[in-house]
Image (cartoon, rainbow, N blue to C red):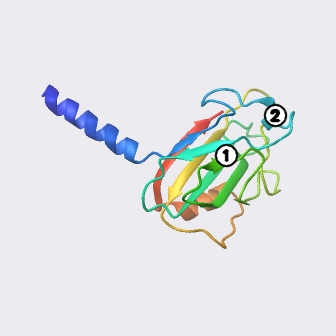
Amino acid sequence: MSKTIVLLTTVLLAARAANAVDLTSPSFKSNEKIPAKFTCEGQNLNPSLNFGNVPAGTKQLVLTMHDPDVPKDLVPSGNFDHWFVWDLPANSTGIAEGAGSTMGLNGTGNPGYLGPCPPDREHRYFFRLYAINITLQGKTFKDRAAVEAAIRGHILAQSELVG
């Protein structure tokens, strides 16, 4: 019985690892505060992000950043899109500080990165990287939900970094 449990655990961990792509930042560690430089109180630059362990068959990468802690009286969904980027080549190793690719509209309706600027308390900011088996070249998306809907069913691997 214990051998079966160990084997099953090993198989599940291997399957989970196979579905993860690496997403890290030299600017902050996951579950740490995002430095002021990358917020509305600083230079409002996107942080440098590193990608790795991209699976075979990946055609493009998609990156999103959102805040799920917004007061519902400000945004009824409680979510605020800070940034989303698509059309990233599969061989990308990251995004440099202050750079981007094909960027969608943030929660204010403007293209590009909008750094954290919580109005009421500390918030969490979720950066998600998706390795997808389709290309989104030439497509446009009005918001993060639209790009996530377009890639649903085409995600080979994904990862999350929380600031």
**Where 2 falls versus 38 (above or below)?**
above
Mark 2 is surrounded, within 10 Å at the Cα level, by few (under 14), some (14 to 19) or many (20 or more) other residues, namely some
Q: Give x and y (percent) for residue 11.
A: 26, 40
| Quadrant for the N terminus in the image | top left
Q: Quadrant of residue 43?
A: top right
For the point 67% across and 46% down, which residue is it? Answer: 65
Task: Give the alpha-carbon distance from disc 2 to disc 1, as whole Å.
Answer: 16 Å
Dot 1 lies on which element?
strand
Dot 2 lies on which element?
helix
User: What kind of residue is marked 2?
Assistant: Lys
Q: Quadrant of residue 73?
A: top right
For the point 69% across and 68% down, which residue is it? Answer: 140
Q: Give x and y (percent) for residue 134.
A: 51, 67
Comparing labels 2 and 1, the label whose residue is closer to the camera: 2
48 on left or right of 17:
right
Task: Give residue 65's mark.
Answer: 1
| Residue lying farthest to the left in this orientation | 1
Instruction: Kindly check if marks 2 and 1 are in contact, taking CB atoms under 8 A apart as contact.
Output: no
Say whether disc 2 or disc 1 marks the residue closer to the N-terminus.
Answer: 2
Q: Give x and y (percent) for residue 118.
A: 79, 33
Nearer to us in this view, 29 or 16: 29
Name the residue tied to disc 2. 37
User: What kind of residue is marked 1?
Assistant: Met
Q: Is residue 74 visible?
A: yes
For the point 52% across and 46% down, which residue is it? Answer: 52
**Where 46 falls versus 26 (above or below)?**
below
Nearer to us in this view, 40 or 18: 18
Q: Quadrant of residue 47?
A: top right
Q: Give x and y (percent) for residue 77.
A: 68, 46
